[in-house]
Image (cartoon, grey):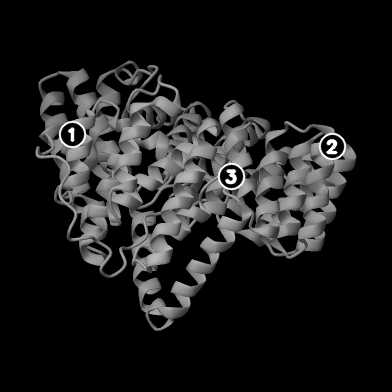
Amino acid sequence: MDESRRSADRDLEQARAALERGEMHHAADHLAGAIAHAPTLPETHELLSRLAARADGGLELFPLEQHAFVGTVVARAHLLAAAGRPEDGLPLLVAASGHTPGVDWAGVPWVIDPGLGVRMEPGLLAQIVMQLCTAIGDPAPEAGRDALRPYLTLVRHAVEAHPEQAMLLGAGSALARRLGEATLAVDWAVRGARLRPSKLAEIWLGYAYRSAGRIPESLAALRRAVMYDPEDLSVYADIAGTLADHGRLDDALAWADRALAKDPEFDCAVHTAHRLRYRADGDLAHLVRLADFQRDHPDATHEHADLADCCADQPWLSRVPSAPAAATDPAREPFVAGRPSDEAVERLHRLAHPLWPHPPAAYDAALGLVLVEPEDLLALIARPPAAPDNEVGLALAAHDPALWARCSQVWACLGLLHHRTDEPWAESARRRLLVDLATQGTDQITEAALFALVTSAWIDPEARADVGTLVTRRLDDVATAGHPIAWSLAQLALATPGLDAEVRERAAAVVAAEEEYTVPLVPRQRRRGGRLRRWLSGRTTR
């Protein structure tokens, strides 16, 4: 916050100087920068008013372009409001809030002025509020809700002025529940459904009841929505998800199957069904089929998080596990003589991370290493560089210093997967390099290479049988010898698509035996890992 204020003050100083010289465009550029750094600073708005007075309103100084700077967009919104056109400025402010919801773009007097709620056409305001709801998440992140509350105040004023507008009540309910105002959300949704019964009104009401914990009423409203439109399969998926979240898994699967019977390719139903089936029996095959569906249907109706939710916090499916004691093999010789180039280290520093949503997402993220030569990737694996001086590096240094080297090796191995991708898997250079790394030792390089191989099986069905054979052989090697990496390789086996049921059972037995043996250490290790995951999840955008 202090740095943002200092940056805003510097921009303001330069804007004042440019204004005194009559350099209006330079003044506008610096004012846009000041607004971006400190959007509610009174000095900024005072200077914006001075600029508007000298430039006949100043709108031409803040043009809307295809990729307009957010400070420019917000400045134009304020000028439109000052010119008596707040209904034209509000959509611009909402666009900024949708871009960065946690920034206090709307914390200005004209947004919470009761007169704006009276003046704005209710249907237009409802449309703008729905656009905001789409952008901020459901629910909105708690840390950023205060920055969005001025919009809720505006809706309150509008509802008081236009109490019979059902669409405004429904959109306001959607915003209220996203901001944690469940009681208000229910009140507005009930009023809207009474004024104008419809499918959309029942959906808004069902979501409001759900946010308030009133599950039977929520399900009743969503079922009424189905009666209005039996072909809207997204509602079936919502009912299934609500039932599953409250312990009624069989009923949830029945609703998902009803949707799939109508359209086996409907993405919401497919995602929900696979997530619920995985929740019911824990079979990885459901997640692999979901990943295959995502790959084959890139044009989904909207972004889904079901695969990431199922993989969350599971070793190798979503994170690099911490190294077990004595996991390295001191007899193993470095397999390359060179050191990685500075460019290779820089690229690795930009993307290496101990967390990812799921294996296909890790593969996609590793595309950032596509320009790194295999020799450099091998050097990064053999001699991991020091941790970067960024949030990830600082977090690992504080919570688990040894984890950085493992991350480096994992991501460098993932980078090898992007080497010569035109070659068929069986004869490919990427397979040969990774198999060599996975089979020449019993250390954390083995783990990293095997994870890359497992990831290849997630993204390429033709690689699955081959990878399954490799993983089975390596699991047998380390489990028989009682090697320290046995637990980690067993977890890798459990993350491997298409592995034989008997091998999965052996892997599960290895995991269970290791965890039983180390039970006194588990609570402390989990607390450390939990803090690290929470810190990283809250401080990064990955």
Q: In the picture provided, is 278 more to the left or to the right than 72?
A: right
Q: In whole angstroms, how far apart are the C-alphas of marks 3 and 2?
A: 26 Å
Tell me if residue 63 comes above or below residue 362 in the rendering. above
Looking at the rendered structure, the secondary structure element under dot 2 is: helix
The crowd level at tag 1 (other Cα within 10 Å; few <14, some 14-19, many 20+) is many
Q: Which mark, residue 234? A: none
Residue 294 at x, y percent in the picture: 59, 34
Q: Which mark, residue 498? A: 3
Disc 3 vs disc 1: which is toward the camera? 3
Residue type (three-letter) at the residue carrying disc 1: Asp
Q: Which mark, residue 376? A: 1
Looking at the rendered structure, the secondary structure element under dot 1 is: helix
| Residue located at (35% from left, 52% from top) | 447
User: Is the Cβ of the residue at disc 1 closer than 8 Å to that at disc 2?
Assistant: no
Residue type (three-letter) at the residue carrying disc 2: Ala
Residue type (three-letter) at the residue carrying disc 3: Gly
Q: In whole angstroms, how far apart are the C-alphas of marks 3 and 1?
A: 32 Å
| Residue located at (68% from left, 46% from top) | 274
Residue 88 at x, y percent in the picture: 50, 26
Q: In whole angstroms, how far apart are the C-alphas of marks 1 and 2?
A: 51 Å
Residue 497 appears in view: yes
Residue 385 at x, y percent in the picture: 15, 47
| Residue located at (63% from left, 32% from top) | 127
Residues 30 and 82: in front is: 30
Q: Which residue is mark 2?
A: 261
User: Is the Cβ of the residue at disc 3 closer than 8 Å to that at disc 1?
Assistant: no
